[in-house]
């Protein structure tokens, strides 16, 4: 199927039939060195529609959109905006052509105000005052028209992630964008914030704006888009009407084979408690209370999922359990492993490993891997003192390499070359290296933080299966994820964290995303219908703005 | 200590503050754009030499100043080349510039003038003339304020007043103009500027050029204002002290004035009272002279206040994939 024969926006504004499509790409190709990121891509997006682009990591979605936004110049091909060659050579000309882009990692200046961020690069004159007052009025108008309320004088870094995203949308609208591209817009949002975003996007569509959403969440594609294009390995494999497709079909098109979207698992058969956390409190070095009396039990053979917006204490909890609490923090309470107390302070991660705790950390590139070290070296970290890998006073590198080769084969790490540096693997394969290393040691308790962040569908399926296998083999697993689908799919019990507290515990089959979303926003009980407006992340929340994950 | 002594110390502090303030503002522009510059020292040094040499050869302080700015700009261009165009390591480039200036000034000085690296003493029109502020004489009689105006504020050379005027000017430029907004943005998140369709490279070059001009002025003032001629290593670490003051000032112009005045005051006190007799112990003169440097170390070690440097400082900007 080619791109041009199937698109006819169902929800399109009435006049679309007669006018030229908002965007038409013809034969776009782009290579980075030997890597062909985009191959002869053609795509048409009718005016006034929401168009989804799905594909695995590295499928070329972001490259294609960066070309459209003038960030890269294509090696070949043509971009037509409203039927005319827009001559897009850089971001400035893309903006002039009416294209606005909301990047996955926001391009905001954290210590400037909303107003300053909005006018940056679009100032009216050499002096700021006139631009600032005009922008203030414009923002008020846009806020009313599209539910885009943001305090214009707030400093960006004090805003929740959802509000920061609104600033990005406002930036684009202030520049009179008719076409809005959003790259993974819901990755960092709570369910309620995502709902609000969708309302905004629908409102923009009503006004005749054209919207492109890049995402890997198929549920969202089904919910919000009119048409959807699927990319695989740099090629456009299909463009279909959303109404005519299903998540299963899209997943199959993305991966090129049948994929199991639901996690298939037998009911848990929990055994004795392995991990007991009792009234754990933590005050960090700067005096901010991060944990306010957390009680938690994880039994052998079950997966306990911690849901919550990032920055509500999950990171601190996992760091304490992993044996690397922030230096200078005050930690009180108790952590027991098989009934024995673990030291809370002055402990080291190695002692935790000896106690039988494995750890898949939240940020694999910072805590899980040393990016410039080779894959085989990375597979032994944490176990490098084991006698097994020693030969006299030296490391037995041959043995480590042999083991790495075996793990690579078992966990289907690609490319299957253990001498490559960790940074040369894709996100999914990097994560497989970490998962392989931690699972291989058969820990009694496995701490898992954001196991599938930035990981493609095929690898997600694989990692989820491995975690279930570990559970069935009797391991206790504590899972932290901001992906609610993942928490609901994997967990045998779900606890929700908000502001350093456990807000409640639910059974995955007796709760809903809406109820969990309320708990995540700090609303007790959870049964109340969603309020107007949107939850703000806790003021101490650390928006993942600065993390800069690939 | 009588009032006359206080006035003398303040007057001297103002003069000693000037090169620090100019260098500090120079560093502010560069670092606000995301380019760390430890080469302030080297740029000031070569500018001082250029001012001394050109002043001695032509007898004109203005030609000396021009030569100073050009020499400093040349080193700034090297730094810009390394840090912006070739995305090299900014610290190493800065260190190299300091070494280059240190060696080149002495080598050229010896080969041109044969005075062991000095330049001939500058006289008359080769030095900055002192400026008497209007009404200084008339107001001298007014109690307290009069002498403060006539003896501390009045009677300095042009660079002193330029440096003082540059503080509000820099503040205005940073917070009230388009250039300032973009400059602050590019030092904190260059990607935000790039995606807004503004050239990161051009902004950073502009900032580095301003740094070059201001260091040139600072150097010229050292050789043709504060002293009368160039002396080997005459900057004496002022570039580093200016950097410490910049951190102390948290990269803000008005605080830069306060921080550099503090350093100027310490130097002035050390000059006025080489030894302080505290009865049982006498603080030796070496300690007093070392005081500004000790404070520099303390500030740089982060003991005073919490400084938040421009986030993108020191990192070359590469478009992310």
Image: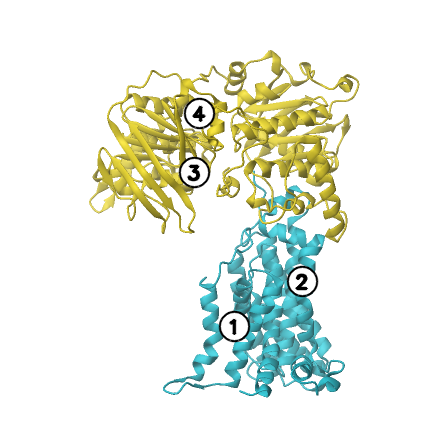
Q: Which residue is mark 2?
A: B170
- Residue lying at 52% horizontally and 72% vertically, measured from the top left: B237
Q: Is residue B315 left or right of residue A274?
A: right
Q: Which residue is mark 1?
A: B237
Picture disc at residue A71: none
Q: Are both tags, 4 and 1, on one chain?
A: no
- Residue lying at 72% horizontally and 43% vertically, measured from the top left: A135
The yellow-tinted chain is: A
- Report how far apart the C-alphas of labels 3 and 2 lie in the structure: 41 Å
Q: Which residue is mark 4?
A: A486
Q: Chain of mark 2?
A: B
Mark 2 lies on a secondary structure that is helix
Residue B124 vertical position relative to residue A86 in the rendered view, above or below:
below
Badge nearest the viewer, 3 or 2: 2
Residue A498 vertical position relative to residue A24 in the rendered view, above or below:
below
The cyan-tinted chain is: B
Q: Badge 3: how crowded within 10 Å, few (<14), some, or many (20+)? A: some
- Asked whether disc 4 touches disc 3, contact meaning CB atoms under 8 Å apart, the reply is no
- Report how far apart the C-alphas of labels 3 and 1 lie in the structure: 42 Å
* Residue B123, position as x, y percentages in the image: 68, 86
Q: Nearer the viewer, residue B250 or A16?
A: B250
Q: Quadrant of residue B318?
A: top right
* Residue B211, position as x, y percentages in the image: 63, 63
- Report how far apart the C-alphas of labels 2 and 1 lie in the structure: 24 Å
User: How many circles with numbers are drawn on the protein?
Assistant: 4
- Quadrant containing the N terminus of chain A is top right
Q: Are both tags, 3 and 2, on one chain?
A: no
């Amino acid at each position: 199927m080619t791109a041009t024969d199937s698109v006819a926006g169902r929800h399109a504004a009435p006049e679309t039939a007669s006018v030229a499509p908002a965007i038409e790409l013809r034969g776009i190709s782009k290579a980075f060195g030997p890597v062909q990121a985009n191959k002869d891509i053609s795509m048409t997006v009718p005016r006034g529609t929401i168009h989804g682009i799905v594909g695995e990591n590295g499928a070329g979605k972001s490259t294609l959109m960066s070309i459209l936004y003038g960030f890269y110049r294509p090696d070949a091909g043509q971009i037509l905006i409203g039927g005319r060659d827009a001559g897009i050579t850089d971001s400035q000309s893309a903006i002039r052509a009416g294209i606005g882009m909301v990047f996955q990692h926001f391009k905001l200046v954290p210590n400037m105000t909303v107003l300053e961020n909005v006018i940056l690069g679009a100032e009216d004159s050499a002096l700021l005052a006139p631009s600032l007052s005009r922008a203030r009025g414009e923002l008020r108008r846009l806020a009313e028209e599209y539910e885009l309320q943001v305090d214009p004088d707030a400093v960006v870094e004090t805003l929740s992630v959802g509000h920061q995203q609104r600033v990005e949308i406002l930036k684009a609208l202030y520049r009179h964008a008719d076409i809005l591209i959003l790259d993974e817009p819901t990755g960092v949002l709570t369910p309620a914030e995502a709902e609000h975003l969708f309302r905004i996007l629908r409102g923009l569509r009503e006004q005749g704006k054209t919207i492109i959403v890049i995402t890997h969440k198929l549920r969202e594609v089904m919910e919000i888009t009119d048409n959807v294009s699927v990319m695989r390995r740099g090629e456009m494999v299909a463009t279909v009407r959303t109404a005519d497709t299903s998540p299963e079909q899209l997943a199959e098109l993305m991966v090129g084979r049948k994929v199991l979207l639901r996690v298939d698992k037998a009911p848990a058969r929990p055994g004795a408690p392995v991990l007991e956390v009792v009234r754990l409190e933590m005050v960090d070095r700067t005096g901010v209370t991060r944990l306010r009396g957390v009680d938690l039990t994880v039994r052998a053979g079950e997966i306990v999922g911690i849901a919550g917006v990032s920055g509500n204490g999950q990171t601190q909890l996992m760091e304490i359990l992993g044996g690397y609490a922030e230096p200078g923090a005050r930690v009180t309470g108790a952590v027991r492993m098989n009934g024995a107390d673990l030291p809370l302070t002055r402990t080291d991660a190695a002692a935790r490993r000896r106690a039988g705790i494995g750890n898949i950390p939240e940020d694999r590139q910072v805590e899980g891997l040393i990016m410039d070290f080779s894959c085989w070296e990375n597979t032994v970290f944490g176990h490098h003192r084991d006698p097994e890998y020693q030969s006299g006073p030296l490391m037995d590198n041959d043995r480590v390499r042999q083991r790495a080769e075996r793990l690579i084969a078992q966990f289907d790490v690609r490319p299957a070359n253990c001498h490559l540096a960790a940074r040369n693997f894709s996100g999914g394969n990097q994560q497989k290296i970490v998962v392989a290393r931690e699972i291989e040691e058969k820990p009694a308790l496995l701490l898992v933080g954001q196991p599938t962040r930035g990981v493609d569908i095929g690898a997600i399926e694989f990692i989820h299966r491995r975690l279930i296998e570990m559970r069935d083999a009797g391991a206790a697993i504590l899972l932290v994820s901001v992906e609610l689908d993942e928490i609901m799919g994997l967990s045998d019990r779900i606890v929700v964290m908000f502001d350093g507290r456990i807000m409640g515990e639910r059974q995955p089959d007796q709760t809903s995303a809406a109820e969990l979303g309320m708990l995540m926003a700090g609303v007790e009980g959870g049964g109340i219908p969603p309020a107007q407006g949107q939850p703000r992340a806790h003021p101490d929340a650390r928006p993942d703005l600065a993390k800069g994950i690939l | 200590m009588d009032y006359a002594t206080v006035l003398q110390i303040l007057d001297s502090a103002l003069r000693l503050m000037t090169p620090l303030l100019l260098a500090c503002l120079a560093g502010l522009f560069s670092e606000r754009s995301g380019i760390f510059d430890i080469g302030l020292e080297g740029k000031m040094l070569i500018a001082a030499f250029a001012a001394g040499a050109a002043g001695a050869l032509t007898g004109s302080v203005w030609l000396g100043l021009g030569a100073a700015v050009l020499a400093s700009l040349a080193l700034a261009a090297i730094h810009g080349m390394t840090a912006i165009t070739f995305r090299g390591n900014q610290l190493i480039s800065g260190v190299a510039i300091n070494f280059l200036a240190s060696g080149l000034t002495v080598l050229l000085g010896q080969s041109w003038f044969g005075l062991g690296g000095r330049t001939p003493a500058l006289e008359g029109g080769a030095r900055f003339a002192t400026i008497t502020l209007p009404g200084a004489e008339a107001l001298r009689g007014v109690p307290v304020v009069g002498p403060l105006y006539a003896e501390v504020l009045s009677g300095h050379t042009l660079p002193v007043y330029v440096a003082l005027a540059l503080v509000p000017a820099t503040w205005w430029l940073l917070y009230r103009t388009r250039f300032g907004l973009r400059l602050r943005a590019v030092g904190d998140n260059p990607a935000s500027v790039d995606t807004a369709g503004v050239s990161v490279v051009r902004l950073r070059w502009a900032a580095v050029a301003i740094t070059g001009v201001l260091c040139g002025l600072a150097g010229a003032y050292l050789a043709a204002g504060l002293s009368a001629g160039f002396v080997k290593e005459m900057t004496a670490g002022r570039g580093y002290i200016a950097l410490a003051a910049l951190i102390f000032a948290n990269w803000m112009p008005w605080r830069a004035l306060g921080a550099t005045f503090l350093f100027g005051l310490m130097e002035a006190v050390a000059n006025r009272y080489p030894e302080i007799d505290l009865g049982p112990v006498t603080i030796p003169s070496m300690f007093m002279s070392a005081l500004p440097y000790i404070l520099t170390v303390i500030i740089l070690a982060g003991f005073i206040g919490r400084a938040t440097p421009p986030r993108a400082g020191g990192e070359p900007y590469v478009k992310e994939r």
